[in-house]
Image: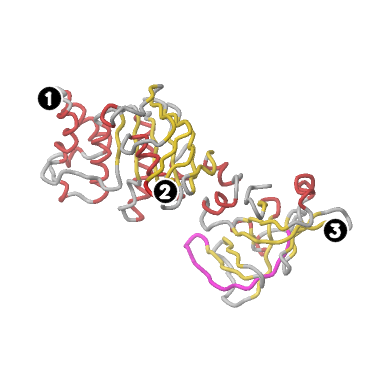
């Protein structure tokens, strides 16, 4: 396997559409990196640039230490699995998986060995004599992955390979691809718009927006320490709650945040970092799980109490999402399923301010 390095990579399409804007990052040997972001953010274009399917406007791409800017896709020693599996309908599974090796004139016995080895890894040995129309979506996806595996490339590129599958099968195939990564010890770059896929699969995640990298980090660091408001809102489900308000200082020197209706006192340890923002408008972020039901939690110096009206209840089985209104802003809370209030009821809530985030109102950069 090999590492992949992008240096100041830019791709500009006609009419000055910037799909990738000065992108730089490194994927280490045997690492699983996920590119994630909303539709149109440039993640698939970046993957196609690595594969050689799009031509660079500026920058450099290295695979295993070799500059590949002018090297055609077939000579980059990569294998790509697309959203559309592109299986040949007239060929059996065996011949679909063997086709690339035949074009490269591998010996027949070597082709047979590689195909059967990949089929065994993916659990599709009994499907080798079937044609694609006789396969389910998940089986077709395995065949597409198997076709990539037999080539034993330096780098695997996945472009939203699970988006055509139903929810249950997507969960299953996420686990299968992760197991495959461990088994092959492969370098994998994986593109998805689904942040749950990114969080559960990637060792590191590259979050993109409008062709620009917003943050590169591990899943937990992205969740707990987002670099800006976009990352904070994109990572996590339900999304982080945001409240716009003003920071003020009380007569004892403590800081509090208010949107005009609710007032939230801050833990003393935040004073030093936020002191210079007193009197300025900020954006507070709080995740749904940090809005607590006081019936099941004890008040601490780092929790504050607010009141809100329940507008919508979404039972999820093991938990329930409450959509609330404080009179000035809407919030989402994640509760256990026991003792849930009724729609229209006013209820007391505890907000865990030790887990709060603050963002600059103008730049949206994280302050805390």
x and y, in percent, of residue 44 in the image = 38, 44
Per the rendering, the mark at residue 250 is 3
Residue 368 is at least partly visible in this image: no
Residue named by callout 2 = 17
Q: CA distance from mark 2 to mark 1?
A: 47 Å
Callout 1 environment at 10 Å: few (<14), some (14 to 19), or many (20+)?
few
- Depicted 113 relative to depicted 224: above or below: above
Q: Which residues are magenta?
A: 304-319
Query: Is 221 part of what is drawn in magenta?
Result: no
Residues at marks 2 and 1 touching, judged by CB atoms closer than 8 Å = no
Q: Nearer the viewer, residue 357 or 128?
A: 357
Residue at 29% from the left image edge and 33% from the top image edge: 79
**Colour basis:** secondary structure
x and y, in percent, of residue 201 in the image = 43, 42
Residue at 51% from the left image edge and 55% from the top image edge: 237
Residue named by callout 1 = 108
Q: Secondary structure at mark 1?
A: helix
* Main SS, magenta residues: strand
Eye-nearest disc, 2 or 1: 2
Quadrant where the N terminus is found in the figure: top left
Which callout, 1 or 3, points at the residue further toward the start of the chain?
1
Residue 270 is at least partly visible in this image: yes
Q: Secondary structure at mark 3?
A: loop
Callout 2 environment at 10 Å: few (<14), some (14 to 19), or many (20+)?
few
Q: Nearer the viewer, residue 26 or 240?
A: 26
Which callout, 2 or 1, points at the residue further toward the start of the chain?
2
Residues at marks 3 and 2 touching, judged by CB atoms closer than 8 Å = no
Q: Secondary structure at mark 2?
A: strand
Per the rendering, the mark at residue 191 is none
- Depicted 112 relative to depicted 344: above or below: above
Which callout, 3 or 2, points at the residue further toward the start of the chain?
2
């Amino acid at each position: 396997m090999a590492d992949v390095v992008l240096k100041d990579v830019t791709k500009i399409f006609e009419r000055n559409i910037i799909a990738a804007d000065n992108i730089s990052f490194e994927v280490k040997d045997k690492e699983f990196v996920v590119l994630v972001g909303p539709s149109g953010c440039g993640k698939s274009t970046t993957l196609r640039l690595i594969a050689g399917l799009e031509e660079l406007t500026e920058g450099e791409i290295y695979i295993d230490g070799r500059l590949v800017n002018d090297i055609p896709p077939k000579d980059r020693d990569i294998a790509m699995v697309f959203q559309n599996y592109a299986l040949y309908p007239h060929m059996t599974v065996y011949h679909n998986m063997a086709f690339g090796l035949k074009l490269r004139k591998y010996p027949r016995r070597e082709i047979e060995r590689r195909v059967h080895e990949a089929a065994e890894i993916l659990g599709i040995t009994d499907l080798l004599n079937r044609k694609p129309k006789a396969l389910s979506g998940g089986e077709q996806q395995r065949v597409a992955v198997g076709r990539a595996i037999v080539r034993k490339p330096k780098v695997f590129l996945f472009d939203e390979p699970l988006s055509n599958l139903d929810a249950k099968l997507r969960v299953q195939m996420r686990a299968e691809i992760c197991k495959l990564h461990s088994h092959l010890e492969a370098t994998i770059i994986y593109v998805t718009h689904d942040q749950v896929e990114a969080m559960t699969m990637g060792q590191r995640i590259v979050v993109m927006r409008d062709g620009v990298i917003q943050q590169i980090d591990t899943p937990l660091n992205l969740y707990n320490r987002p670099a800006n408001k976009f990352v904070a809102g994109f990572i996590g489900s339900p999304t982080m709650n945001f409240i716009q308000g003003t920071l003020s200082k009380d007569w004892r020197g403590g800081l509090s945040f208010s949107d005009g209706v609710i007032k939230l006192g801050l833990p003393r340890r935040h004073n030093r970092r936020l002191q210079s923002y007193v009197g300025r408008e900020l954006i507070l972020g709080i995740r749904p799980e940090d809005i607590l039901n006081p019936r099941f939690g004890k008040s601490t110096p780092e929790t504050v109490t607010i009141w809100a009206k329940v507008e919508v209840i979404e039972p999820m089985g093991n938990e329930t999402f409450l959509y609330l209104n404080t009179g000035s802003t809407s919030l989402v809370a994640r509760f256990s399923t026991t003792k849930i209030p009724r729609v229209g009821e006013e209820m007391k809530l505890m907000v865990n301010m030790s887990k709060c985030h603050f963002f600059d109102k103008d730049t949206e950069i994280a302050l805390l």
